[in-house]
Image: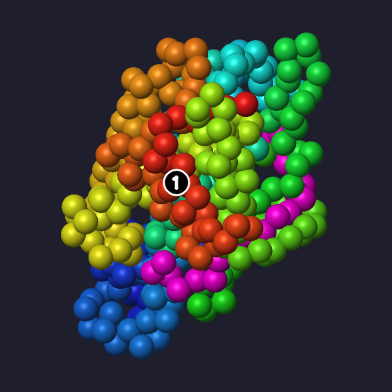
Amino acid sequence: MVQNCLCARCQKSASRVCAGCKSSPSIAVTPELLTIYYCSRECQVADWPAHKPLCKASSSRRSLYRAADTIQKAFFIYREVVFDKLFTKVEEKNGLLLLTEGYYARNEIFVPFPITLVKTELDRQAILTHLTCTDALGWLHDFISKILEGFGALLEEYSVKGKNHQRSTVVVCPIGSDVNDSRAYQHDLLKVTLPGGQAYALDTTSAQYGYYKPLIPWDDFVSWRVDYVMAVRPFGSCKLDFLKELEKNVRPDKKIQGKVAIFGLDAGVFYYNNAFSSVLSESSNKWLKREAFNDFNTLLGQMAESFEEKEKDLLGNIEKDLTGYRDLLVGQGRLGKKFGKSTARLPSQSKDDKICAKLVEGDKSENGKSVEDVVAEMMKLANVFIV
């Protein structure tokens, strides 16, 4: 018997819970969990006409908070697998998380995450999210689209200049000068507007500023954490930017020593992130089919215990597939010295690489070819020479 809970209709002592909106978060910067109680089935049925709008809105809000949390966890997994910053020291000083950057080997693309240098989970999240806001929007685009498609929400990419940082993450070069302070850059995130008009900031990389919850009501976010808005673009713009950058730097028509040229090491990072992004998307789709779920709404609407179990299983499968693909590339000597080989190469076409090319449809390059066509041509070739 739940104590001190009153029936929403008659105000008598109650223990019967509305399962539809049980433990839904309130609309607040730090949301409380709301639960509606009834003393009997009769009172619950009688109250349904009045409670129905609140119940539907509360249930949708609970699902959105769950979705945001799952997206953030997936990004942490993704980012740790494709980590590309070589840090040799991590320390807290005067409210700053200082990350000392080491010297990279030639053609280094990814390096192992420095887990032995990390003291707390919050430090881990700050390191993983440092200057990765566009990565989260771009490389997780397909996964975010899939998990949010059932909400009927308007999704917009916002670029803002932040304020009131609780903490800042700063990368320091080996000689001791600050090179990358997260406070100096614009911050990109997603605005999610539900059909009823409720709007939220979905910010999976806010840990670099000392904020660790991925979802916050939009008005609260703007008033407390935004100095000014720099740009607003449709969702998918960051991914399209990445694909255009990939197309610009990967040139199947130019060869060096008989190999396709990719101009700049950054283009190699773009290439592999696109590959791992597709692995993540395919992994989540495979999981949905295995669970016989039509979409992620089925997952997000589960009762608490069942949701936690299935979310853990989903994320475990994503991690397994991402690390499996990485290990495949490591075994073939494609990820650089820190993973056991001295020179990084881009992969040849094989059955294991077919999952790496689901791109934005309809985008055309200057030569009239789509991005997908250009990358498909590239992947048929044996190697890429990084210059």
The color scheme shown is rainbow
Give the answer, above or below, for where 213 lies relative to 344.
Answer: below
Q: How many marks?
A: 1
192 magenta-colored: no
Task: List x then y, in percent, for residue 87.
Answer: 60, 18
Task: List x then y, in percent, for residue 96.
Answer: 72, 27
335 with respect to 225 (left or right): left
Residue displayed at 30% across by 54% down: 285
Q: Crowding at label 1, few (<14), some or many (≥20) Cα neighbours within 10 Å? A: some
Give the answer, above or below, for where 18 lies relative to 4.
Answer: below
22 with respect to 84 (left or right): left
For the residue labelled by badge 1, is the local secondary structure a helix, a strand or a loop?
helix
Residue corresponding to mark 1: 377
Q: Quadrant of the C terminus?
A: top right
Three-letter amino acid code at the position of disc 1: Glu
Task: List x then y, in percent, for residue 322.
Answer: 36, 35
Instruction: Evaluate whether residue 382 shows in this view.
Output: yes
The span picked out in magenta is 149-168
Instruction: Evaluate whether residue 216 shows in this view.
Output: no
Residue displayed at 60% across by 16% down: 106
Report the front residue among 101 and 11: 101
Report the front residue among 254 and 46: 254
Task: List x then y, in percent, for residue 157.
Answer: 62, 60
Tell me the quarter of the picture where residue 348 sits. top left
155 magenta-colored: yes
Q: Quadrant of the N terminus?
A: bottom left
Residue displayed at 25% across by 55% down: 288
Give the answer, above or below, for where 195 lies relative to 50.
Answer: above
284 with respect to 115 (left or right): left
Tell me the quarter of the picture where residue 2 sits. bottom left
323 with respect to 386 (left or right): left
